[in-house]
Amino acid sequence: MKDESTTGATDAFVAHRTLLFTVAYEILGSASDAEDVLQETWLRWVDVDLTQVRERRAYLARITTRQALNRLRTLQRRREDYVGQWLPEPLLTSPDVAEDVLLAESVSMALMVVLESLAPTERAVFVLRETFDFAYDEIADAVEKSPEAVRQIAHRARGHVRSRRPRRVATPAETRTALEAFKVSIETGDVQALMDVLAPDVVVLADGGGVKQAVPNPVRGADRVARLFVGGMRKAGGVLTAVPWTVNGHPGLLVAMDGELDGVFAAQVQDGRIAGIYYVRNPHKLGRLEEEVPLTRHERTRAGAAAPSAGQTTGSQRRSTASPSGESAQ
């Protein structure tokens, strides 16, 4: 490829990189696998004849989606042997993600768990249509189906998700209030206060990955959940601290025991009470908690208005020399 063409490919990839990472992450539920998909996307994109590409955003998303689907089908077979419950890899996200209500909802732990129940193609179609608003013919190219088939898949996926998602998404303020009440009740061992902040039908999902102890199956009901957390604290016997942070676009907690990171706590709040708890303890999923990960539904503008790529950092965050795909330059 000529230098001029390579520069054009690089510019286009960098401009869309955060969007592509977000697409891959929503399809896979894993940031590390999403980064691998972006590397594969770059290797294919750099060999494309750009004079034949009419819409670069759609073309790049098509490559990313196909690579993500290939990886997801492999991952799903592996997840069948996963020890305990599998939860998405949590990300610390910047305030601009929370400000984009649609984006924040699409990457929330609650919705990402629901997406796990979709077939791979259904998940890809749902993500591309509902979050990124790709046209049906563009999605059809990405998943190698007809536009008519994609419309049917999208309709089926929407119905599946709608039946399992909250009736109303809590505001960040409502979630922060519920999390603070939960945090205080756990720290003080006040069972009644804990019961008051839990919905009667609250469900706990915990992911230890077979490395850290975690309940192997969902725990349901306020009484059982309260006993689980209060009893667990008593047995642990350490000093627990929980720092508020934005996790996957919503208020969450970084939990430490005796100063060591123990896990990430996310919650689904309905009517002021916690209805869903997602606690990730698997250390292999806690490697991206040193800096915020940018996510977006849009490409980066030339003026730099959008967030940097997922492999880059800003301001006081660490900086590293990276290729357009995000891998360190050798």
Image (cartoon, grey):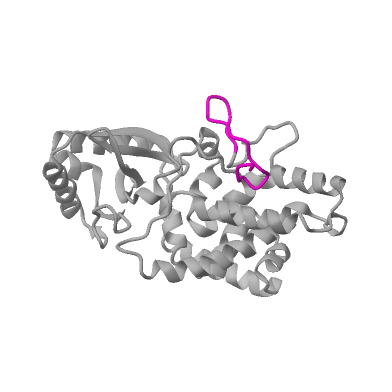
Image position, residue 297 (x, y; %): 62, 46
Give the residue at x 49% y 39%: 93
Residue at (32, 61) in percent of width and height = 85
Query: Which quadrant of the figure contains the C terminus?
Result: top right
Which sits in the foreground, 149 or 109? 109
Q: Position of residue 258 (x, y in %)?
A: 22, 34
Residue 154 visible within the image: yes
Residue 150, given in percent of the width and then of the height, sits at 64, 70
Q: Which residues are magenta?
A: 312-330
Where residue 134 appears, x then y in whole percent?
68, 57
Q: Is residue 73 above or below residue 10?
A: below
Residue at the outermost top position:
316
Answer yes or no: is residue 297 visible. Answer: no
Residue 197 in the magenta stretch? The answer is no
Left of 35 or right of it: where is 146? right
Classified by dominant secondary structure, the portion drawn in magenta counts as: loop
Up/down of 315 relative to 217, above or below: above
Camera-side residue of 17 and 111: 17
Classify residue 78 as left or right of residue 123.
left
